[in-house]
Image (cartoon, rainbow, N blue to C red):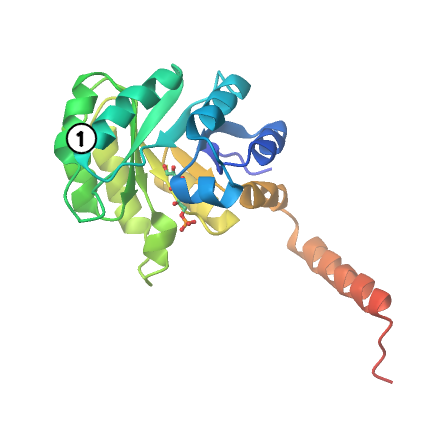
Amino acid sequence: MTELKIDIYADGADIAEMKKAYQGGRLAGFTTNPSLMKKAGVKDYKAFAKEVVAEFPHLPISFEVFGDDFATMEQEAEIITQFGPNVFVKIPVMNSKGESSVPLIKKLSEQDIKLNITAIFTVEQVKAVVNALKPGVKNVVSVFAGRIADTGVDPIDIMRQSVDICRAKEGAQLLWASPREVLNIIQADQVGADIITCTPDLIAKLDGLGKDLTQFSQETVQMFLRDSTSLGFSVL
Ligand SMILES: O=C(CO)[C@@H](O)[C@H](O)[C@H](O)[C@H](O)COP(=O)(O)O
């Protein structure tokens, strides 16, 4: 069995799926975002958050602000942080107009609000965000490695540099966001990221970690046989 040092969080907003993922025994926390809440059909943000916090009072959970102007984000952050002592407030690194959230991040961090800064893609953004965080307060810095890879860029170097920047600030934890495959969990562990947040489907695939490849080859052929038998086809 491959030993992982990294904390694995579940990324989603479907409470039944979150509970199921937690029962697997590997989870150290949860993240959500507006797109995941839309997909899961969440109708009432506060009711949803209350239920999640009641279900997992002992695990870190990140809830995102919905506002796009900094005054609204600030008000929402002050409400979200009161959802529970285990709650992190997710603030996007910029708003939809591309205006930097760094001044707001600094303001909220100075109030000891635990933050998860999200939608980070560059080392420059990591530097600016970490610089704004109050030392000693637990914070999460979420770099979207999978979306970086979607542009054809290998995210490893960006993630390595991000780990180093976070290590220099007490309390800052680097989160590898948007992983696509189990290999990314190994890579995140190897670069020294503190957290990786994965969909429940990806978490389920962790059962394949360290599996014998010849055995996996045979199981794959057995799957083809099961399906060809059930289809009843023959080329003869
Ligand atoms: O909370 C976080 C990161 O802190 C996550 O919910 C984060 O938003 C998601 O992992 C990403 O948005 C997922 O990206 P993608 O798989 O849709 O490309």
Q: Is residue 187 above or below residue 73?
A: below
Which residue is identified by label 1? 71
Q: Tell which residue pokes out farthest to the left in this image.
A: 103
Q: What residue type is labelled 1?
A: Ala
- Residue at 56 percent across and 31 percent down: it is 15
Q: In the rendered view, does 137 fall on the left or right side of 24? A: left
| Residue 233 seen from this side | yes
**Residue 16 location, quadrant:** top right
Q: Residues within 10 Å of mark 1 (few under 14, many from 20)?
A: few
Q: Is residue 207 above or below residue 153?
A: above
Q: Tell which residue pokes out farthest to the front in this image.
A: 43
Nearer-the-camera pick, 164 or 142: 142
Q: Tell which residue pokes out farthest to the bottom in this image.
A: 236
| Quarter of the image with the C terminus in it | bottom right
- Residue at 40 percent across and 33 percent down: it is 195
Query: Does ligand 1 reach within 8 Å of label 1's beta carbon?
Result: no
Residue 11: percent from left, percent from top = 47, 38
Residue 56: percent from left, percent from top = 52, 20
Nearer-the-camera pick, 68 or 135: 68
| Residue 134 seen from this side | no
Nearer-the-camera pick, 6 or 125: 125
**Residue 210 location, quadrant:** top right
Residue 84: percent from left, percent from top = 40, 16
